[in-house]
Image: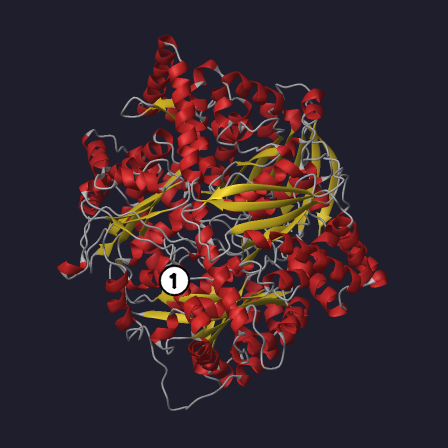
């Protein structure tokens, strides 16, 4: 983790610009800062800040494994959100190329090269000829082999001789990539009881060989895994793992195979698992019956999200006759109907090798060893034709004579008569037979043409219709047997729904009649092809994406390579488009949309009473059940609860824990992963700074980051920057309309995005992390593009145009953007409350963290509402602000510009001349002036932030009522005093707590879907937060008792050498991460360099982690004890939960924050 805060504005409220998953077609202690006493407001406080922000924007690192990610999804494109790792093993160039690169850099005036002194790893793939020969194994028969040229990888598909289970081996030339294993079972729900999802949770709760009550958690505690998860789709359940350490990889693989083929949960001994992971009757303090369970509470959270509800209600109607009619994740109303007998029966019918697909990505040797391990489990089974036949997914026939209108309601806190709150979307079922690769690619291109940019005709028509606040719907969605297309608006007034329906159909009819111009088609085709060429561009290990993509055809008895190898289909599509032009896509609109009556028109309307009605309904239902039980039945339930409590409160015997394979400290690399990066100040004789990272990977693609220093922007304009960035996606320039800009971006680039980066700076002369109110920082707005070498000139021109020639949008467009951003904030809480709770807490203690809150938190929502009022009532004032910002960026002086390039050696050499021309075109100022060095002087915004933070982010406890059935409860505060060293030995005790006490208590016992704890080594802040939590008061108490728990464990001598070793391994795993794609690797090395983060400091942190002992746990407990007595609270919770906790939680009153207005 780099000492930094990077605030990245994502395209969250913009048109989808859906990316095809790059691997293939288908996935396209505490001391408070000195504070005046009157600024401290004590009280229970429970509060929130809704906004839709990517995980990478979170200034506190949250480990994705802490919440098990989003494991329920009806469309694969929604499965692309996993936590980004900052640190990885880069694919560096071989020594021969480095010498050539040095010649390239020597032409740059003043060129210097920095190589961190810690060990640097090189890829061995360059110059190494990859074998095309398939690995052999007696238990597997080879079916097909294929060389994937874009991937630079071999793919081999096998069939297990005994069971006919299919197995795919993916062998990339780059041996530095993560080793990946996955196994998938086709799971076919026939009700809404969520059995497939609950089973996915449950099989990881102990198995025949690994009899611990939670081997999954044990693995998380002490593994170097780079991916460890399980996911339930509508028609399959997937168990993937990844690691870069070979021993760790096979440990993970062994535990997962035993879990899926010999789980304890389907035995009499393990019947408690369904009650913990699925649902159970329990009793509260008043002895009233209630329903608990991890999945039960998770799905209550899912069903609190209006957009999720709209999608799920639509599927119910769109698929009346096949398995997609049912909620594979489980409907909270139906989950309590699942019995142990049904649970076991579902497992027996679906979890058979014949009904599975397994996958390994690694070296040839890895593949052969993996085959041995897989066969050791499968060879005890026989071929079972029925298992495969009965799980086959049948097509839903497109048989609607007319589109079906339907409606439902969703919960809101209040009805606003002046603002639309309804949602309306039209969803078409596109196919009831197999779609060819060519058709799929054609639909991806059509989707881009219709809604892929702001100027796309369907997107533009709806966005500017004034019938709603923002466009919703996934557009084209695939990844299942059948594909859909959805489009609509939210923020609609109920009376406008018929008009909106007419608008959508009228727009589609006009597009069908008029078609697309050649430039639009070329832009769409280029954009889709570019995404396909980027084999590795996401945050997950590359092999994970390959496996999940392969399943989008493999799961339906098609060849997995159909979803990965795209070249032939793309050439076929190009031929068709060259011959037919726009007519090709016009016919698709007519066939799949206009002449397709198998459509659902879903109208979702708000209800202020729904939340209380649902709560009351559940209470009445459970009360009736309790009253109907006999005394013997109640005693039986009590006995089951006592058994569950005994299991949960009893530690596994050491001999059981010892059966779970683990690593030793000797298995860990003693040195951290480092990169090589070159920096040139005064590049090409200018005042600009140029950095270059030579990283192999996506051949022929160059990644360009052009950063403009914004420190001199007036502080009163800082709060407007998120809006300005949104505007850059929609405005014209002085020379080009937005439609022209979007076409040129599509034709010439792989996309241009904008990142607002706030970067605390480090004293490179100090190898320690010191807790401080750091006022040294860089603030930059980055224009981030990617292109092929042939398009470098056009890409640089587009960056220059967007940066220096942008003009403000019209009043109408500004209001549309503001309303859309506000709506995005207001609707995102059901899935992201934990992020905003952490952000809100951290802002109270640190200026840099406060900027995160100001620009992307609750405070920004308040700012946006103020901006909307100004735009509506005083446009001249609003326009002056926007003109001021566009004028500021119009200069783009060289002295304030930094350029970061990433690519392979040949690519970087080929763009050198174009980069030189771009640098020389920048504005050059007074040669005698000296730019500010923010390593030496305080950032000019800090003097204003000091005052504003204490006016806005008081250290107090806060609450806010949200429309949800679950809560997000956070506590946070300073763990270290100003000037104290934050040492690496603090990592292992925190790892021990969050993967032990916090997980066991908040999740397993109290029913939250997840819990996490994270610290900031830059300022000494520590935060804890729950995720989709049915509790409030209990969770605050759990966080408050962490120090006491740790103290008790120390006194009981429970912190053994093995305990410490496990925690150390987990810490190292969290900082090493997976093999990042080229763009992320180059960005990481760049951020490290310009922030002053040194390899020496990172290595010292690593050494301190590795040296952790019992004394460090004792010291941490002392710090933690003070933290628990001084932390502040943020709670995002239903109003009833807040009212019940008022005056109780932490024995302090609460301060309620209303953000509805």
Give x and y (percent) for residue 983: 26, 52
Which residue ends up furthest to the top in the rendered image?
A: 632
912 or 435: nearer the viewer: 435
Kindly identify the residue that appears in the image at 59 percent across and 70 percent down.
908
| Color scheme of the displayed model | secondary structure
Q: Position of residue 305 (x, y in %)?
A: 48, 44
Viewer-proximal residue among 1089 and 122: 1089
Give the secondary structure at mark 1.
Answer: helix
Q: With 526 as the anchor, is 1028 left or right in this view?
A: left
Q: Residue furthest right?
A: 579
User: How many marks do you count on the picture?
Assistant: 1
Image quadrant in which the C terminus is located: bottom left
Residue 398 showing in the rendered view: yes
Asked if one can make out residue 85 in the rendered structure from this viewpoint, the answer is: no
Residue at point 67% right, 58% down? 503
Residue 36 as seen in the image, left or right of residue 675: left
State which quadrant residue 849 falls in: bottom left
Which residue is at the front of the view, 547 or 822?
A: 822
The quadrant of the image that shows the N terminus is bottom left
**Around disc 1, counting alpha carbons within 10 Å, would you say few (fewer than 14), some (14 to 19), or many (20 or more)?**
many
Residue farthest to the left, as pictured: 37
- Residue found 30% across the figure and 38% down from its top: 1035
Percent of width and height locating residue 181 = 56, 38
Q: Quadrant of residue 146?
A: top right
Q: Is residue 1049 above or below residue 695?
A: above
**In the displayed structure, does residue 866 sit left or right of residue 745?**
left
Q: Which residue carries the number 1 mark?
A: 860
Which picture quadrant has residue 618? top left
């Amino acid at each position: 983790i780099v000492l930094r805060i990077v605030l990245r504005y994502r395209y969250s409220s913009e048109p989808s610009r859906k990316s095809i998953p790059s691997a293939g077609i288908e996935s396209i202690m505490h001391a408070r800062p000195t504070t005046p006493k009157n600024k401290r407001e004590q009280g229970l406080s429970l509060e929130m800040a809704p906004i839709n922000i990517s995980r990478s924007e979170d200034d506190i690192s949250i480990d994705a494994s802490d919440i098990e990610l989003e494991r329920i999804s009806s469309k694969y494109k929604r499965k692309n959100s996993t936590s980004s790792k900052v640190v990885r093993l880069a694919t560096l160039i071989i020594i021969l190329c480095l010498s050539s690169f040095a010649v390239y850099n020597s032409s740059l005036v003043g060129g210097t090269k920095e190589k961190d002194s810690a060990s640097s790893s090189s890829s061995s793939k360059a110059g190494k000829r990859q074998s095309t020969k398939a690995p052999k194994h007696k238990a597997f028969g080879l079916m097909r082999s294929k060389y994937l040229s874009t991937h630079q990888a071999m793919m081999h598909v096998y069939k297990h001789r005994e069971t006919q289970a299919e197995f795919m081996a993916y062998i990339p030339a780059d041996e530095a990539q993560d080793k990946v294993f996955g196994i998938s079972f086709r799971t076919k729900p026939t009700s809404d009881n969520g059995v497939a999802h609950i089973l996915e949770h449950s099989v990881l709760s102990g198995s025949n060989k690994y009899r611990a009550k939670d081997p999954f958690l044990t693995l998380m505690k002490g593994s170097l895994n780079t991916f460890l998860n399980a996911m339930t789709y509508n028609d399959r359940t997937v168990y993937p793992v990844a690691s870069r350490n070979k021993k760790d990889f096979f440990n993970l693989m062994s535990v997962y195979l035993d879990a899926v083929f010999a789980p304890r949960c389907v035995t009499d001994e393990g019947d408690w698992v369904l009650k913990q992971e699925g649902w159970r009757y329990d009793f509260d303090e008043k002895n009233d019956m209630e329903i608990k369970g991890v999945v039960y509470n998770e799905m209550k959270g899912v069903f609190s999200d209006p957009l999720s509800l709209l999608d799920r209600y639509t599927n119910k109607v769109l698929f009346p006759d096949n398995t997609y009619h049912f909620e594979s994740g489980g409907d909270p109303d139906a989950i309590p109907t699942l019995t142990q007998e049904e649970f076991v029966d579902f497992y027996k019918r679906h979890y058979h090798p014949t009904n599975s697909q397994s996958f390994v990505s690694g070296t040839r040797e890895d593949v052969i060893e993996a085959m041995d391990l897989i066969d050791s489990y499968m060879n005890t089974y026989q071929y079972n034709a029925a298992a495969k036949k009965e799980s086959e997914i049948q097509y839903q026939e497109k048989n609607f004579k007319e589109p079906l209108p339907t409606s439902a309601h969703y919960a809101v806190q209040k009805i606003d008569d002046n603002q639309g709150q309804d949602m309306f979307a039209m969803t078409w079922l596109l196919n009831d037979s197999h779609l060819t690769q060519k058709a799929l690619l054609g639909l991806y291109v059509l989707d881009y043409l219709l809604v892929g940019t702001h100027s796309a005709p369907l997107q533009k028509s709806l966005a500017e219709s004034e019938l709603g606040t923002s466009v919703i719907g996934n557009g084209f969605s695939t990844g299942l047997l059948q594909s859909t297309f959805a489009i609509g608006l939210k923020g609609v007034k109920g009376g406008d729904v018929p008009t909106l329906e007419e608008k959508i159909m009228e727009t589609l009819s006009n597009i069908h009649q008029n078609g697309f111009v050649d430039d639009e088609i070329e832009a769409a085709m280029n954009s889709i092809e570019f995404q396909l060429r980027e084999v590795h561009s996401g945050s997950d290990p590359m092999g994970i994406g390959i496996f999940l993509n392969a399943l989008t055809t493999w799961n339906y008895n098609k060849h997995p390579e159909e979803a990965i190898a795209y070249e032939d289909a793309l050439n076929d599509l190009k031929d068709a488009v060259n011959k037919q032009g726009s007519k090709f896509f016009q016919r698709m609109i007519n066939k799949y949309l206009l002449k397709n009556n198998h459509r659902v028109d879903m109208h979702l309307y708000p209800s202020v009473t729904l939340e209380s009605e649902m709560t009351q309904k559940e209470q009445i239902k459970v009360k009736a059940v309790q009253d109907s039980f006999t005394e013997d039945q109640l005693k039986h339930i009590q006995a089951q609860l006592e058994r569950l409590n005994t299991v949960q409160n009893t530690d596994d015997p050491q001999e059981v824990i010892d059966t779970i394979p683990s690593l030793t400290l000797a298995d860990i690399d003693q040195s951290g992963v480092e990169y090589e990066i070159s920096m040139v100040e005064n590049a090409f004789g200018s005042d600009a700074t140029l950095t270059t990272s030579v990283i192999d990977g996506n051949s022929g693609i160059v990644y360009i980051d052009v950063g403009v220093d914004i420190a001199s922007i007036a502080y009163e304009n800082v709060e407007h920057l998120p809006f300005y960035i949104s505007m850059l996606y929609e405005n014209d320039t002085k020379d080009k309309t937005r439609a022209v800009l979007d076409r040129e971006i599509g034709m010439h680039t792989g996309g241009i995005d904008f990142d607002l980066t706030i970067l605390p700076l480090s004293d490179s002369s100090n190898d320690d992390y010191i807790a401080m109110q750091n006022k040294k920082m860089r603030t930059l707005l980055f224009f981030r593009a990617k292109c092929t070498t042939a398009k470098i000139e056009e890409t640089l021109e587009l960056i220059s145009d967007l940066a220096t020639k942008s003009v403000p949008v019209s009043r109408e467009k500004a209001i549309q953007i503001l309303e859309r951003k506000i709506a995005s904030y207001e609707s995102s809480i059901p899935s992201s409350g934990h992020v905003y709770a952490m952000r809100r807490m951290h802002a109270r203690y640190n200026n840099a963290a406060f900027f995160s809150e100001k620009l992307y938190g609750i405070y920004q929502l308040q700012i946006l509402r103020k901006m909307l009022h100004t735009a509506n009532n005083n446009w001249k004032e609003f326009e002056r602000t926007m003109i001021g910002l566009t004028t500021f960026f119009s200069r783009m002086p060289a002295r304030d510009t930094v350029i970061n390039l990433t690519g392979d050696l040949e690519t970087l050499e080929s763009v050198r001349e174009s980069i030189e021309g771009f640098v020389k075109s920048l504005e050059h100022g007074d040669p005698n002036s000296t730019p500010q060095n923010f390593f030496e002087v305080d950032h000019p915004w800090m003097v204003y932030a000091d005052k504003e933070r204490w006016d806005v982010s008081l250290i107090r406890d806060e609450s806010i009522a949200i429309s949800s059935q679950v809560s997000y409860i956070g506590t946070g505060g300073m763990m270290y005093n100003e000037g104290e060293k934050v040492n690496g030995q603090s990592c292992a005790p925190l790892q021990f707590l969050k993967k032990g006490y916090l997980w066991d208590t908040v999740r397993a016992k109290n029913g939250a879907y997840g819990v996490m704890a994270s610290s900031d080594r830059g300022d000494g802040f520590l935060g804890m937060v729950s995720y989709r939590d049915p509790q409030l008061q209990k969770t605050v108490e759990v966080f408050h008792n962490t120090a006491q728990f740790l103290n008790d464990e120390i006194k009981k001598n429970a912190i053994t050498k093995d305990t410490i070793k496990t925690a150390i391994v987990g810490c190292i795993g969290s900082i090493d991460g997976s093999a990042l794609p080229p763009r992320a690797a180059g960005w990481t090395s760049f951020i490290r360099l310009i922030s002053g983060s040194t390899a020496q400091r990172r290595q010292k942190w690593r050494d301190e982690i590795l040296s952790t002992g019992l004394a460090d746990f004792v010291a941490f407990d002392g710090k933690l004890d003070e933290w628990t007595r001084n932390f502040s609270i943020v709670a995002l919770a239903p109003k009833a939960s807040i009212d019940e906790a008022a005056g109780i939680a932490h024995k302090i009153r609460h301060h309620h924050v209303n953000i509805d207005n």
